[in-house]
Image (cartoon, grey):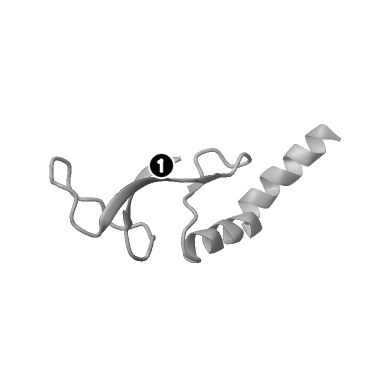
C-alpha cells in the first residue's frame, strides 16, 4: 500500500503537494494498493484508471519476465 494524493472528484492519483505545504482543495490522501511482481524484484505497479493495469499486463508479456517465470517453473519441476 502506498499513501498517495488523490483527486477528490475523479478518485485518480494526482501530484502530491511539496513537503511542508498544505493539501490543496480537491485533493485527499488515501492508501492505494500496489501490484508486486514476485518474479521481477523491484517491480511495483499502482493500479489506476486503465494505464497502470495495462502497464502490468505489458510487463507480464515482457521477454525478461517470461524467462524468469520459465526458470522458476523449471526449478520446481
Q: Position of residue 48 (x, y in %)?
A: 46, 59
**Residue furthest out toward the left:** 21
The residue carrying mark 1 is 2
Q: Nearer the viewer, residue 56 or 21?
A: 21
Is residue 69 toward the left or the right of residue 15 in the image? right
Q: Which residue of the protein is positioned furthest toward the top in this rendering?
A: 76
Q: Quadrant of residue 36?
A: top right
Apparent side of residue 11 relative to residue 55 in the rendered image (left or right): left
**Which residue is found at the position 38% from the left and 61% from the top?**
12
Q: Position of residue 14 (x, y in %)?
A: 31, 58
SS for callout 1: strand
From the viewer's perspective, is 19 left or right of 34?
left
Q: Position of residue 15 (x, y in %)?
A: 27, 56
Other residues around mark 1 within 10 Å, as few (<14) / some (14–19) / many (≥20): few
- Residue at 41 percent across and 42 percent down: it is 2
Residue displayed at 71% across by 45% down: 69
Query: Between 7 and 42, which is closer to the camera in this rendering?
Result: 7
**Would residue 51 appear left or right of 74 to someone viewing this image?**
left
Q: Quadrant of residue 68?
A: top right
Asked which quadrant contains residue 71, the reply is top right
Q: Quadrant of the C terminus?
A: top right
Rendered position, 51 above or below 76? below
| Residue beneath the point at 63% across and 41% down | 39
Amino acid at each position: 500500500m502506498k499513501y498517495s494524493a488523490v483527486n477528490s472528484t475523479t478518485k485518480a492519483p494526482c501530484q502530491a503537494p511539496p513537503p511542508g505545504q498544505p493539501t490543496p482543495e480537491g485533493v485527499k490522501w488515501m492508501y492505494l494498493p500496489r501490484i508486486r511482481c514476485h518474479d521481477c524484484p523491484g517491480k511495483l505497479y499502482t493500479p489506476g484508471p486503465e494505464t497502470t493495469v495495462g502497464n502490468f499486463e505489458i510487463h507480464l508479456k515482457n521477454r525478461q519476465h517470461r524467462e524468469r517465470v520459465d526458470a522458476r517453473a523449471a526449478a520446481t519441476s
